[in-house]
Amino acid sequence: MSENIMRIIDLRGQKLSRAELLAAMPRAAMGTSEATDLVRPILDDVKERGAAALRDFEEKFDHVRPKNLRVPAEAIADALTTLDPEVRAAIEESVRRARAVAKNQVPKDFHTDLAPGARVAERWIPIQRVGLYVPGGKAVYPSSVIMNAVPAQAAGVESLAIATPPARDNAEGLPNKTILATCAILGVDEVYAVGGAQAIAMFAYGAKGSEPQDGDVLCDPVDKITGPGNIFVATAKSLVSAFVGIDAVAGPTEIGIIADKTANPSLLAADLIGQAEHDELAGSVLFTDSPELAEKVQENLNYRVPKTEHAERVHTSLSGTQSAIVLTDGLDQSIDAANAYAAEHLEIQTEDADAVVKRIKNAGAIFRGPYSPVPLGDYMSGSNHVLPTGGTARFAAGLGVHTFMKPVEVIEYDEEGLKALAARINAFAVSEDLPAHGECVLSRFVKDPYDKATLREQEIEAGLR
Ligand code: NAD
């Protein structure tokens, strides 16, 4: 086994407590605290100097000083005209499917009638202005434009801005052309060639212009920031989250796979490698009760990893402590362990996949069966690929229309509805030593709520008792 790429975590024969099971799961360290010292001055500088600071940081970190921090409309339109038709077709298919799902996701307003004249309604209101971060450092992610913008648009967000780093090969400091073309397809025209923590600062504080082409205000502040990014982006998001909404602080990407002896080991190996390709820190974890399957997966990895394009990155990721094959006593323990791991992406490759799906409590998204691999969801299943990482799927959901809306309760009581509760509200208010609360309600029905000596009679006379 020594030449095998992935380590084994053997849970067989162990009765672990909840805490022990959580601790046994492989996990990458987030390490945002180390980045905090680096990111805080970036945020402060952008807040203070706006576009001038943004240009300085772009020069420092992305090695280009963009003339136009806001991408001109012609550049967005041009990018679409020069887009490869096959790529265009793929993007359009992805958008079509994402829009179809998002349309069904829009939450419905509803109301509850509690008594005559007593109604509580719930209205879902779109967030007014959002900033979408699209990563673009090591790789480019036009798919992330779709995953962020489509649900925001379906939610009815009025104002939507995108920030993404300038492309490495663009002397003018424009972002990657496929990203711009995707913005054009989606009808997004407010795009900034700004990356990293400085982009998050721009969204959070807004930014005044520093050159004539910027105008007085380069970018207005947003109400919520969404989208994935590297450690600097994640740290900046968590620092500004005290006063602006964020979706989540995303860590390295992960896959969990629950497989039994019926699964195809070469497909499992392909799926583990596919996830590991993202990042050296990506986590790939296989939960199986079949040691024979585990051995075959290792053999497949030994064959496939050296052949794949990004072999070194994949090897580092699969051999890292954040990746493992978890051997279990049976399907029950595999499911318990997968629920403890709470994978960002969870594939189910078992004999009765539907039965397993029903028992999953924690996962960012569940990929059921051999024909629902994770890259399908990365690009065009119609589902969203911005998902909770690092075990946060225990309490958090992936991006969706709900991310861009907020429920607001509307209290609709009339005279009859309030009258029926007035004496009880007063009793509650007095018990909390907040008598003016009670007097506020009583004032609507009795002459003098401050005359405590006659209050009971006044209440009876007014029909409150
Ligand atoms: P990025 O856009 O997140 O970061 C690039 C920016 O980082 C640069 O513009 C630069 O300003 C800044 N930066 C670089 N070095 C810096 C330094 N030393 N100090 C301060 N700032 C610095 O792109 P990336 O780096 O390629 O990372 C993208 C991440 O997003 C990856 O981890 C990837 O896995 C993840 N991702 C996740 C999803 C998802 O849905 N979960 C989708 C796509 C990408």
Image (cartoon, rainbow, N blue to C red):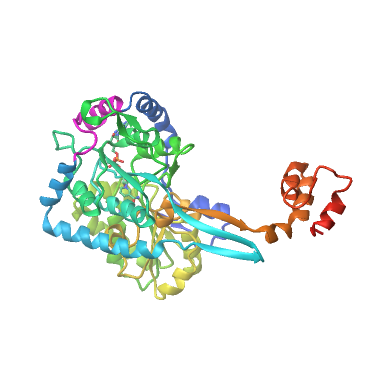
Ligand 1 position by quadrant: top left
Q: Position of residue 166 (x, y in %)?
A: 21, 37
The answer, for residue 284, to whether it is visible in the render is no
Question: For the C terminus, which image quadrant?
Answer: bottom right
Q: Quadrant of residue 459?
A: bottom right
Q: Nearer the viewer, residue 298 or 257?
A: 257
Q: Position of residue 96 (x, y in %)?
A: 26, 63
Q: Residue furthest bottom?
A: 352
283 sits left or right of 410 in the view: left
In the image, is residue 172 above or below residue 361? above
Q: Nearer the viewer, residue 106 or 264?
A: 106
Residue 53 belongs to the span the image colors magenta? yes
Q: Residue furthest right?
A: 453
Q: Position of residue 218 (x, y in %)?
A: 29, 32
In the image, is residue 267 above or below residue 458? below
Q: Nearer the viewer, residue 455 or 209?
A: 455
Q: Residue at x 38, y 72 (%)?
A: 261
Q: Residue at x 21, y 60 (%)?
A: 92
Question: For the N terminus, which image quadrant?
Answer: bottom left
Q: Residue at x 75, y 45 (%)?
A: 439
Q: Position of residue 323 (x, y in %)?
A: 38, 52
Q: Nearer the viewer, residue 151 or 259?
A: 151
Q: Residue at x 34, y 34 (%)?
A: 202
Residue 170 belongs to the span the image colors magenta? no
Q: Quadrant of residue 290?
A: bottom left
In the image, is residue 224 above or below residue 14? above
In the image, is residue 449 above or below residue 370? above
The answer, for residue 239, to whether it is visible in the render is yes
Magenta segment: 51-72
